[in-house]
Structures are given as structure tokens and as C-alpha cells.
Amino acid sequence: MSDSNTSDFTNPSTFILHGIPGLESAHVWISIPFCTMYIVTILGNFIILFIVKTESSLHGPMYYFLFMLAIIDLVISTSIMPKTLSIFWFNSRRIDFNACLTQMYFIHGFLVIESGIFVAMALDRYVAICHPLRHSTILTNSVVAKIGLAAVLRGSMLVVPYPILAKRWPYCRTNLILTTHCEHMAVVKLACTSSDISSYYGLFVLFCVRGLDVFFITLSYIQILRAIFSLPTKDARHKTFGTCVSHLCAIFVFYIPHLFSSLTHRYGNNVPLHFHVLTANMYLLLPSMLNPIIYGVKTKQVRVRMLRLITYKGT
């Protein structure tokens, strides 16, 4: 077998990314929606970056966080899609061992950073609705920068053990990874010794870090809803809640597929392997593609500027 090295080795020089098991003959067809999603992701997020940077009226905390979110989505999607498409189009399945660990670090690190940015955006909505007169004094540019830096440092540091632990395990079974990218658990499952430490640490990051993020987001929205329901008119309540819709949609798109994929990967032994791989790709690609669409449709300032940009380009 040329692609699956089953001889004994301690650390392989390369891994083999299988693609989507059971659907190899359909790789070219599957690449069409994947490529389309990647193109939409690139265009959508670059438009968001351009709009926020060039429109002075959008130079505020909410849009600075949106700017950070667009960068994160570009990094996550670009970390996996070029290699995934090369598998589908050219059957280029080999990936260097260290490159695999680097890809793992970028994927999981930026997912944690993105989760932190969603918490920051929830904080922004809380201050804007519950303390509107103090919003500009609480969330100054320096505070926003510090929050963004804290999210980056947290994600960067928490995921460092992933590649370090993965590199120390001996791999004496196979170097064939049954997916399209170097996902953490897909790699450590190939170890020929107990990798429980990696598994437990991954669960810690999933439940303690993401769980805490969801807790703080929920807490923020409990206070937000209290403030909204205390408003005197239905029109005021509707208008105020409308400022949160885009953020809520992005949260659901990010957390629900990720939680579903993580749990099925660990405990869904009876779930078909190709379903595991497809859901793992979807939870990485869907938020990156949908976030600029959600904010472009649901956020008036972004929508108006986007339509103005498209109209200008069309003339």
C-alpha cells in the first residue's frame, strides 16, 4: 500500500490525508461546493475588512470586533481549504509531519480566538444596551485592543499543548489520517500508546473554555433581555433587540456545529466515517462563510455600505 505506511516507526516524516472515506470517487464533485464556499468566504470577509477600514462611521467597538472576526475566519478557512482542494483535484494527500502539527495549531488556536471574540461582542452589546450613556467611555479603543489581544493570547497559549503532546506520541500503526485536514483527535488517535492526556485536554478546552465562553455570552444576554423588556414601547424593544440579531445568528452558526462535530467525533462510533469528515469540514467552513453574510444582511450600517460598494462597482 503506497499511501498507508503500516510499518513500524516512531515519528513519521509525513502523514497521508485520506480525504472523505467512502466518497473518494466523488471528490471532484464534492470539491465544487467546497470551492464555492471558500470563494464566498474570501470575498465576503475581504469586503467586511474593506468596509470597516474605509468607513469612518464604523470605527467603533462592534465593528472593530467584526474586523477581527473577519481576519480569524480568513485564517481558519485558508488553513484547511488549499490542502483539501489539492486532495480533491490532484490527489495530493501527503503532508509533512510538522506541517500537519502547524495546521492543527492554527485550526484549533483560531477557533478558541474566535470564541473569545464572540464573548467580546456580547460584552459590547451588553454595554451598548444596558449602559448606553457609558458605552464610549467603557469600551475605548485601548480597551477594545486589550480585549482583542487577550483573546489572541488565550487562544495561542491554550492550544500549544495540542502539537506538543501530538509530537511526543509514538506512531507505530499507520500514518493515514482518515480526513481532509489535521484535526487534533484524528491525529492523536493514530498513536500506538495511550493518548488519554491529549483527549482529556481537548475535552477541557471544549467544555471549560468554550463552556465558559457560552456561559458569559448567556449571562450577557440575560441582562440584555432584561433591559429590552423594561423598555416602554414594543417598537423600542424590537429596534433594540434588532441590534443583537446578527451576533446571535453568528453565535449559533459557530457553536452548534462545532459542539456536534466534537461530540460525534469522540463518541459517535456508529456514525459513518464520511459523515464525521463532512461535519468536521462544515463546522470550520460554514461560520467563516456565513459570518460576513449574516452581518451584511442583518447590520444596517454594513448592509448600506456594502450595497453602496456593489453599486459603485457596477457603474
Image (cartoon, rainbow, N blue to C red):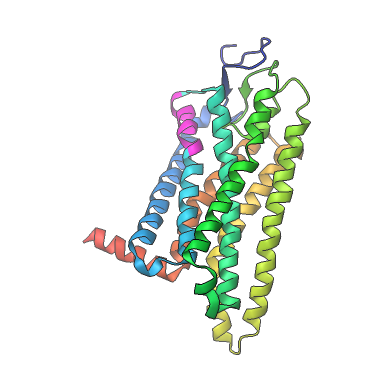
**Of 159 and 177, the residue lying toward us:** 159
Quick check: 194 above or below 185? above
Q: Quadrant of residue 266?
A: top right
Magenta-drawn stretch, dominant element (helix, strand or loop): helix
- Residue farthest front in this picture: 142
**Of 115 and 308, the residue lying toward us:** 115
Residue 175 seen in the current view: yes
Residue 294 seen in the current view: no
Quick check: 260 above or below 234? above
Image coords of residue 107 (percent x, y): 56, 40
Image coords of residue 136 (percent x, y): 49, 73
**Of 50 and 91, the residue lying toward us:** 50
Left or right: residue 254 compared with residue 87: right
Residue for point 66% across, 17% down: 174
Residue for point 75% across, 28% down: 195
What span is in magenta?
A: 79-90
Indicate yes or no whether the magenta region holds residue 83. yes
Q: Quadrant of the N terminus?
A: top right
Residue for point 45% across, 34% down: 82
Indicate yes or no whether the magenta region holds residue 215. no
- Residue farthest left in this picture: 315
Q: Quadrant of residue 245?
A: bottom right
Quick check: 70 above or below 197? below
Image coords of residue 227 (percent x, y): 64, 80
Q: Quadrant of the C terminus?
A: bottom left
- Residue farthest top in this picture: 7
Image coords of residue 79 (percent x, y): 50, 37
